[in-house]
Image (cartoon, grey):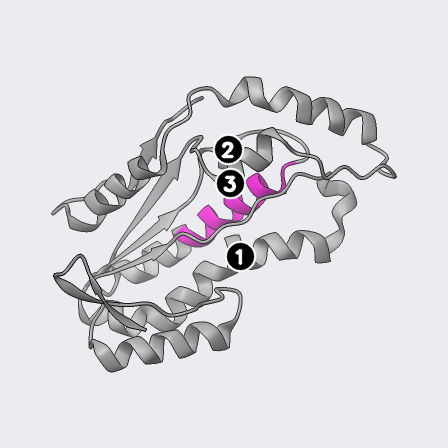
Amino acid sequence: MISDFSGKKDFLALPLNVTSESDVKHCAEKLNLKITHLDALISNAGIFDFFPVSESGAEKIKKIFDVNVFGLMNLTKYFLPMLAKASGRLIVISSESYKVPSPFQPYSVSKQALESVFEAIKIELSLKGIKSILIRPGAMQTQILDDTIHYKNFNENSLFKTEFKNFVKSVPKYIGKISIPEEVSKVVLKAGTAKNPKAVYHINHNP
């Protein structure tokens, strides 16, 4: 739909499933009817879960990869022509947890994969004058954090049942300081408008 946004500019809202190539293609085509170029593309979609990766099988972990990794690939494929016309910017939201050496975290595994894909895309896009920026938020007050702290989706048949429950109990004490989502939006704005943006921005970094 088209609606007034802050009383200043038109705001186009479109439904989009980043795991669906047809959805992303349709969204890009709709947007292309309104504008001819794109100044910034922000890849932010992400989902979270805890479970033993060794027991997951491909299908279960693929659901996380579909959003956290392949979503970025779908977005860049179909929005790249508009982004190239503007010599725009690609801004990708990753996570500080990408480097956490811990079991039972398919989310971290997906973020590691995301960063590898990002590096390949970043080099290619630079050939067309497009800057690519990575943002790594730490703990943010979001639904994902709530799900992390209050995790209850236990598999009683898991070989790692005891270890997994102990792991989940230990998670809250390692989270540390919690920031608000608005901190991320401020950094995204800076990354999208700074003349010489950083390659990587850290928010609420907690080694």
Looking at the rendered structure, the kind of residue marked 1 is Val
Residue 162, quarter of picture: top right
Magenta stretch: give its range. 105-118
Secondary structure category for the residue under label 2: helix
Label 3: which secondary element: helix
Q: Which residue is mark 1?
A: 67
> Which mark, by number, is residue 43?
none
**What is the distance, in whole Å, between disc 1 and disc 2 at their CAs?**
19 Å
Task: Tell me if mark 3 has few (under 14), some (14-19) or many (20+) residues whose alpha carbon lies within 10 angstroms of its own.
Answer: few
Contact between labelled residues 2 and 1, with CB atoms less than 8 Å apart: no
Q: Is residue 94 above or below residue 44?
A: above
Q: CA distance from mark 1 to mark 3?
A: 16 Å
User: Is 108 one of the magenta-colored residues?
Assistant: yes
Q: Which mark is residue 99?
A: 2
Where residue 155 sits: x, y (%)?
A: 80, 39
Residue 40 locus on image (x, y percent): 25, 59
The vertical placement of 39 against 57, above or below, is below
Is residue 186 shown left or right of residue 114?
A: left
Camera-near label (2 vs 3) is 3
| Residue 172 falls in image quadrant | top right
Q: Are marks 2 and 3 in contact (CB under 8 Å)?
A: no
| Label whose residue precedes the other's in the sequence (2 or 3) | 2
State which mark lies toward you, 1 or 2: 1
Q: Main secondary structure of the magenta part?
A: helix
Residue 79 magenta-drawn?
Answer: no
| Amino acid marked by disc 3 | Gln
Residue farthest to the top? 173
Badge 1: few (under 14), some or many (20 or more) residues near its Cα, within 10 Å? many
Badge 1 or badge 3: first in the primary sequence: 1
Q: CA distance from mark 2 to mark 3?
A: 21 Å
Residue at image mark 3: 143
Q: Give the structural element (helix, strand or loop) at label 1.
A: helix
